[in-house]
Amino acid sequence: MHITDNVIREVLPNDLTILVQRETRAPVVAVVTHVKAGYFDEPDEWVGMSHVLEHMLFKGTDRRGPGDIAHETQSLGGYLNAGTSYVKTVYYTALPSSSGGIEKALDIQADALRNSALDREELGRELEVIIQEANRKLDSPDAVAGETLYELLFHKHRMRRWRIGTEAGLREFTREAVWEYYSTRYTPGRVVVGIVGDLDTQQAVELARGIYGDWNRPTVTVESSPAEPREFIPKTRSMFGDVKRPIAVVGWRTVGALHEDTAALDVAASVLGLGRGARLYRVVRTAGLASSAQATHFTPGEVGVFDITLAADGDRLDDAVTRSVEVALELAQDGPTESELDRVRAMVTMRRARVFESMDSRAAALCEAEALGGYTLVDEEYDKLMAVTPDDVKDVTARYLSPDRACGVFYLPRGDAGRFGGNSWPLELTVSTPILHPSAVSDVEVSSATTDSTVDIVYYDGEVLRHSYPGVDVLVKSKPGSGLVTLGLDVAGLPSMETEANTGISRLLARSTVRGAGGKTGEELALAAESLGGGIVASSAADGLGWGITVPPESLRAAAELLRIVALEPNLESADIAKERVLQASDARRSQDDMLRHPIQRVLAQAFEGDAYGLPQIGEPETVAALTGDDVREWGAAVGGYRATVVAVGDLDRESMLEGIAPLAGWPAAEEAAAERGGHVVFHAQSGSEHRDKAQSALAMAFPSVPAASPDRFAIAVLGSLLSGLAGRLFEELRDKRSLAYTVAAMPWLRRRGGAMLTYIATSPDRESEARQGMLEELERLVEKRVPEPELTRARNYAAGLVEMRQQNASSVASEILNAWLNGVLDEYTTTAERIRAVTAEEVARVAADVFGTGQRAEYVLRGVGQADGRTGGR
């Protein structure tokens, strides 16, 4: 059965296209408006206009004032979002189908699409917000390097431009210019509306006809991008800035989305960069040359870019670049093996299944295909990918990925000279002998173990089934129709034993386990897992160490065996640990360049000083570098002594899932398994800061909150919804009214032994004090004044709706079941949304006073200088 088999398509007399599909595997409905207008539709004097208009469509219409669109959507329990790319601007709404709000959701989107007010004063305020967003992007090395590559690859085509626009250019935009763009690009013939989910298809079609049918705006011919000349000059550019770890991007010009070579190029990118079994991972990352090595093929409209992105410390970056291009060159000479293509096909199939789990992703994919040429392309392009042969990959790689047609961008810390420049580019490489010997996929030897039917079985509201064995608790939930099963193994407690002296050791252990286990090498493990369609994901978090994988239902037992040997039989060879240690230390340095993650981690370190909750799970660079193989092996020896939890959610009945996880049922922990360290965590009110050469300052605050199992968690969820999101108080006051920031948020951070409410804002350095004071004033207002009932109802519905919509994805369901079990509240799992909707104004007032009214808070600010000059030699 094809994904598009039951799609209803109707083109209205005004040329607007409607796509409707019934999908009942989750009680969710999505409405997606796809406008065929993006960065390629902007003349040079309007660079960034598409993105500006995306923002302005949320700012009101003739019938709805600023903020009303977000308010009404959240009142339905739904969320809305939007995104702009080179050939499209897409608006999303998703909501629980139980709200009966599909008609209202369609009306909201249609009103914004057809009747945007584009108020002059609102535009002025929003442009300041977008300038903050542009500054945030300047502080992202990955974004700067990626778009600089496009500038080098294209000389005439609009792909070459800094797509969000510059501060100077944005300040020139007038209401009249934005209106002209809106009235000429937002016309019925350029719009596809997708309506997908738990709905009555005929009713949805009739609603759409009535709402969009009388919209008449004439189609206007818009000048397209200049064509790119065939002539090409390979170039490099080195940029220097305040970055902790260098990155490099090497890229080639290719072809557009509908070209006959695109499928083979997509497969080539997957052979090189998808998963641990990919060639770049095995040759570059496993060898320790780079902490990440990825390949992608990006095809917006009529153009394409194939790129390899690498992150590595400076002394290894040059070798990583050379080695990566050699790997591509070898693929061009010899092509992939059939087993490599089988691995890619399996992984692409599973990724596709995961994308189509959620209703908004499904609707967006259908709309994008329709805009390209027809919604059936969703299936046709997949079929083309599955039909690609080794010779196809060899051919396109040889024709498009020649080293003498590559451009390179290097973003380096100041003082790092680098090697590549005009005299060493283009690369002159040959592969005289094979540099890669792909391993054959080995079968997973699955034990004949069975689950014990005599153990105690508990049913939670008829949805979750629990079997408890001496060393492990098994939780399963059937989720029909998805074509996949998500399996997770969690060992609670070990990360809570970390100290400042060994922080990051749990993460290093997790990462090292997938380098070899059960007598298999890391490459053999990766190929075994990915031939099933999944990849083993090893992780550590504040409360546990875990491994997970998503596979087709028939592969569950083999996947369970793989997780068992990785967790209990890791090789932990000293050489492997040493390589992983270097890479993790590099990743720890790279995390310090993240303007969101880094301040949040540092404020947690202030709030929970002296406790594992305050330590970065990835570790500090110096701490990780000092860990030894013996340290990691000793740490790993304790894993089997902790009680484990296994969660399986997916497209099997519960009894079949229980049989599928049988290899994990014999987990060796005793009934009285090791316990985690410490009781309720102590909160510390203190502050810290650092100065960086960044365009923005980022301020994070932490306020004491409750543990994850507290009865107050429902009121905390409502409190978070009151503050955050497009209709939240922080968004409305600090972003919409004051234009202080693009990113502002409040995030409950609730864990087993304690919690915090986190707030974050990134703003211009000269407005840091204003942003801090504005944040505190909004939080104080929440304490001092009772929340009006309409606002409270909206926040309750939104918080509850998010819970319901997370039921779309097997991985999200598995995560929520695991957390509920570990926190002792699994018996309340199915009533979470109901309990949130029952939260009273008195409960919100009490928890707001407990969280924000005590004067207890931690703060951390990453203070920028106001002008990111790290683009030396760049824009």
Image: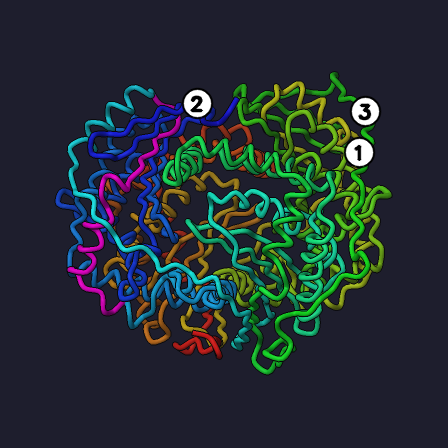
First in sequence: mark 2 or mark 3? 2
Q: CA distance from mark 2 to mark 3?
A: 35 Å
Residue 177 occupies which quadrant of the picture? bottom left
Residue at disc 1, secondary structure? loop
Residue at disc 3, secondary structure? loop
Establish if 459 lies above or below 85.
above
Q: Where is mark 1, residue-wise?
A: 444
Are circles 1 and 2 on residues that touch, CB within 8 Å? no
Can residue 540 be spotted in the picture?
A: yes
Residue at disc 2, secondary structure? loop
Q: Position of residue 98 (x, y in %)?
A: 35, 25
Q: Residues within 10 Å of mark 2 (few under 14, many from 20)?
A: some
Establish if 462 lies above or below 19.
above
Q: Position of residue 482 (x, y in %)?
A: 54, 27
Q: Position of residue 65 (x, y in %)?
A: 17, 48
The kind of residue on which mark 1 rests is: Val
Are circles 1 and 3 on residues that touch, CB within 8 Å? no
Q: Position of residue 43 (x, y in %)?
A: 28, 61
The part of the chain drawn in magenta is 170-199
At a point 45% along the width and 70% down the height, the residue shown is 861
At a point 54% along the width and 51% down the height, the residue shown is 297
| Label ID, residue 449 | 3
Q: CA distance from mark 1 to mark 2?
A: 35 Å
| Label ID, residue 24 | 2
At a point 77% along the width and 37% down the height, the residue shown is 564
Give the left or right position of residue 505, taking residue 705 as reference. right
Q: Residues within 10 Å of mark 3 (few under 14, many from 20)?
A: some
